[in-house]
Image (cartoon, rainbow, N blue to C red):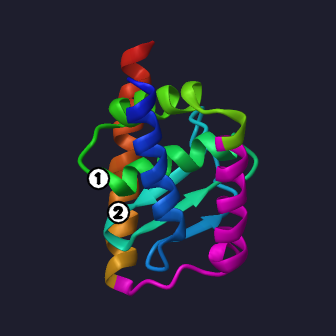
Amino acid sequence: MTKKRANYLLSRVYKLLKDPESFLRLKRIRPEGKLEIAGLAYPWANVQVVDPRRDILPSTIHESLHLIYPNWTEKKVKSTENQIVMKMSIKQFSNLLFRLAECVSANGLGEVDISQNDEKKMNKKTEQERTITKQTLTNKN
């Protein structure tokens, strides 16, 4: 990945964090078995949940990529996240941290406002995401 491409993707993350239609919430996420989950993304509801006990900046980039590119596989999102983080300058980390703080202070401490239908979809999607993630981790071992 070129520096130019990484900067473009990072600008999309910045834009998503500023979008009033997008919602980011900090919440502790319970591990599922041996699987540590740093965040969850719900593209149909434009919601991302990030566990503040984990690597919060890379997790925010990761979950934002899921919202921006909902058809990307977990492997592609993880690879892209790693490449973006490796190419980020200290100033870009600082800017992302500032945007994250603004976003959290605006909406990250309240409850996610979604309909029951969206909640059912969310639970079903979460189950599917965890299954895919488990399969990916199992295949690596």
As drawn, the residue found furthest toward the left would be 71
Question: Which percent across, then down, holds residue 66?
Answer: 38, 50
How busy is the neighbourhood of tag 1: few (under 14 within 10 Å), some, or many (20 plus)?
A: some
How busy is the neighbourhood of tag 2: few (under 14 within 10 Å), some, or many (20 plus)?
A: many
Looking at the image, which residue is at 66% across and 72% down? 108
Looking at the image, which residue is at 30% across and 50% down? 69
Residue 93 falls left or right of residue 130: right
Question: Which percent across, then down, holds residue 57?
Answer: 65, 45
Q: Quadrant of residue 35?
A: top right
Question: Which percent across, then down, holds residue 12?
Answer: 42, 53
Name the quadrant of the N terminus.
Answer: top left
- Badge 2 is on which residue? 43
Q: How far apart are marks 2 and 1 (CA)?
A: 6 Å
- Badge 1 is on which residue? 70
The secondary structure type at the circle numbered 2 is: helix
Q: What residue type is labelled 2?
A: Pro
Is disc 2 in contact with disc 1, using a CB cutoff of under 8 Å?
Answer: yes
